[in-house]
Amino acid sequence: MSDLRIDDQVRAAIWRLPARRREQVGQELLAHIADLRLDLYSQGHDADEVERLVRDRFGEPEQVVGALVRIHNGGLTWRVALTGMLAAIVISSLLWVVRSNWVSQPGTWYEFQRGILYAIFYGLWTVGGLALGQETERPRRDGVRALCVFLLPGLFLVPGPKHAIVPVALPWIFPFVPHTGGFGIVQESLAVVSVFVVGVFFFSGFFMGRRLRTISKRIFL
Amino acid sequence: MPVEKDLARGTTETLLLGLLGRKAMYGYEMAREIEVVTGKLLTLKEGTLYPILHRLEQEGYVEAYWEETAEGRNRRYYRLTQRGEAALAKRREQWRQLDGAVKEVLGA
C-alpha cells in the first residue's frame, strides 16, 4: 500500500484517463472520498481511524480509476493507427537510407529490401504497441501522441499509454546495430521477435503500469 | 447471511437504475442507500459503482449534472433519462419473471 494520501493517489491515477475526463472524474471521486470522511467523522471515529476506513471502503484508487479507464478509453482509432504507421514507415525509411549510405554497404538490393521490410515491420509494430495502451478521445492530439510514443522513450515516466512504450521503442535500436557477416535476416527477425516477446511480457500489463506510476508519482508529486 | 458474489453479479446495473428511479442521487449516496435498503446484504464498491454509472451515462440511460452542496462542494448527481426509465420498466418485468421462475425451481 502506498504512503500517499488517498486523495493524492486519486489525482495521480486520473492521468491515465483521457484529458477531457480527468477533471470531472477526479472531482467526482474526491467528492466521494470527502463524503465518506464526513460520514465517518460523524460516527465518532478519530482521524487515523477515518483514513484507514476510507482506504478500506474506497479501495485502491488505481483499481477504481483503472475500471473507469476501460470505460472511457475507446481503443485505437483509425487516425492513430494511420498516423502511427505512416510516421513509423517514414522515419524507419530515413534511418535505413542513412544506414545504407554511411554505415553499411551502400546501394545494394539486399539492403533496400531489408529496409522496406523493416519499415513495414515498424509501422505494424508501432500500431500494435499503440493498441496496447493508447487513449484516443482527443483525435487532434492523437497524431502527436502517436509520434511521441516511439520518438520519446522519456515519456515513459509520464502516466499515459502505459503498455505501449517499451515494446514500441525497443526495436528502434536495431537499425543502429552494426551489420556483421554472420547475422542474417532470419536471425535478425528472431532477435526482434524475442525482444518483442520479452518486452511485452516483462513490461506490459499491470506490473508495468504499477511500476511506472510509482516512479511517476515520485517524480511529479 | 451474506449473498454470494456470483448470485449478486449482474444485478448492480438494475439496482442502480432502481435507485435512480426513486430520485436523483450522487455516487456516495447510492452506495449508502443500497446498504440501507438491503440491510447491508448488498454493498457497492467504488470500483464497481462508478464504472457502471459512467457506462449507463454513455449509453444514455442516465444523465449527470453538478450541484453545489451547502458547504460549497460540488457533487455529481445522476438521474434517469427517458431511455433509462424505459429500461428500468423492462428490467422490473424481467426480474419479476426471473424471480418467479427461480422460486418455482427452488420451491422457495
Image: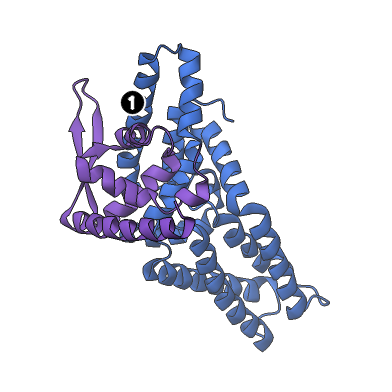
Q: What amino acid does circle 1 point to?
A: Asp
Residue at horizontal 56%, vertical 52%?
A: A153
Vertical placement of A51 versus B104: above or below?
above
Residue at horizontal 35%, vertical 37%?
A: B34
Q: Quadrant of the N terminus of chain A?
A: top right
Residue at horizontal 55%, vertical 32%?
A: A218
What is the letter of the purple chain?
B
The location of residue A90, given as percent across then percent down, is 49, 72
Furthest toward the right, the residue is A182
Furthest toward the left, the residue is B82
Compare residues A157 and A94 and report the one nearer the observer.
A157
Give SS at disc 1: helix
Q: Return the residue at label 1.
A: A35
Q: What shade has chain A been given?
A: blue
The location of residue A138, given as percent across then percent down, is 32, 57
Vertical placement of A13 versus A79: above or below?
above
The location of residue A9, given as percent across then percent down, is 47, 32
Residue at horizontal 27%, vertical 55%?
A: B92
Q: How does the figure colour the protein chain or chains?
A: by chain
